[in-house]
Amino acid sequence: MDTELLATLTQWRRHLHTQPELSEHEHGTAAFVQEKLTALGIPFVAGIGGAGIVATLSRPGSNRSVGLRADIDALPIAEENDLPYASRTPGVMHACGHDGHTVSLLGAAAILARDASWKGTVQFIFQPAEENGVGAKAMLADGLLERFPMERVFTFHNWPGLEAGTVAVHDGPVMAAGGRWSVTLHGLAGHAAIPHQTRDPIVAAGHLIVALQTIVARNVDPIDAVVLSIGQVSGGVVSNQIPPSVSLLGTLRTYRPEVREAVIKRMRSIISGIAEAYDMRTDVEILSTGRAAINTRAEGDLSVAAAGMAGLAVRRDLRPSTTGDDFSFLLQQRPGAYVWIGNGPAGPGGELHNSRYDFNDAILPAAVGWLTHVAKLALTEAPGA
């Protein structure tokens, strides 16, 4: 990548960082992407599954096709960085680096548009609503794969703690299937000094919290990785009242579908049992917003080769993460690979989803280089070859 393009991409990335938008509200970000694609002379279709955009470059001489995806949404996190390009939207920030992913894909499009050495079709997918897990499904429901042919798909995520510019490629699972769950226990409110006249949902919630933690420890094969976490407990407004209800909100992460089904079955059994024991009425919702992201072997190998062509170091020894990404829905439909590109040392506060995180602009050449080369390699042979 030449210095002029790097400077441009850095400027674009920092602009997007100042203007973060939440999932399903990425209208300004989508307009920015469309503006840059227009300036680059790359045709695109907007409004796919919401704010989704697909830009297409085609060259005669080959019927091969490939999709490259970047996520464009931000998170409901208040930024604490003292940066000239810090978020200007209260309570919202690019705490996961999707601003960097977006401009990396724009950079790859810019380079491939002026590179005459390849043949076939490249689809550049700018996907909204990754953070809440609905964007990929919405684009697929809007005919993504039927309207824009692609034999296989690739994406990357920046990875704090991995050496800057190093590409990590997994054999098989990369990220877990995610999903939020919530439970509300409805008891009977009353005076805290007369507890026998109430049905206390706080006590029931305490037992439920402890019981749910036994599922991973006692109902899951230790060989299977499962995370069942409670991220929010809410209930009560005053010290001398037993509240009418208590709500728990959490997340469930798994790799194998059959393990997920077994854990959810056990969750429902425990919730029902504790509700009965403490005479509670319950509202229960357990959502599966994603699937495990699993690389296909040939596309993983191709990703390694692309990294080598881009002059990047490769790691194949990293364990998968229990984080999730709805790119898994695309991988369910097409062979492909999801790689990590090192963001450099995380440091205190530099982790993903942290209020002090920032995408490392120095890895833009690595990200653009990998995307460019993986697309060109994918167009030289059929999937699985």
Image (tube, rainbow, N blue to C red):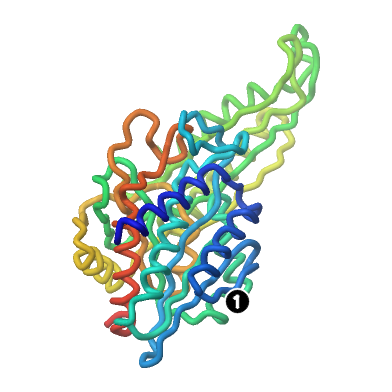
Picture coordinates of residue 296, whole percent (x, y): 33, 70
Going 52% across and 68% down the picture, which residue do you hit?
39
Going 57% across and 67% down the picture, which residue do you hit?
53
Question: Is residue 27 something one can see in this rendering?
Answer: yes
Question: Is residue 270 something one can see in this rendering?
Answer: no
Classify 263 as above or below 207.
below
Going 59% across and 64% down the picture, which residue do you hit?
52
Q: Where on the picture, by quarter, is residue 139?
A: bottom right
Classify 244 as above or below 379.
above
Picture coordinates of residue 280, whole percent (x, y): 72, 32
Secondary structure state at the residue bearing disc 1: loop
Q: Nearer the viewer, residue 241 or 62?
A: 62
Going 46% across and 69% down the picture, which residue do you hit?
332
Classify 267 as above or below 145.
above
Label 1 Cα neighbours within 10 Å, binned few <14 / some 14-19 / many ≥20:
few
Picture coordinates of residue 188, whole percent (x, y): 79, 24
Looking at the rendered structure, the number of numbered marks drawn on it comes to 1
Apparent side of residue 136 relative to residue 66 in the rendered image (left or right)? right
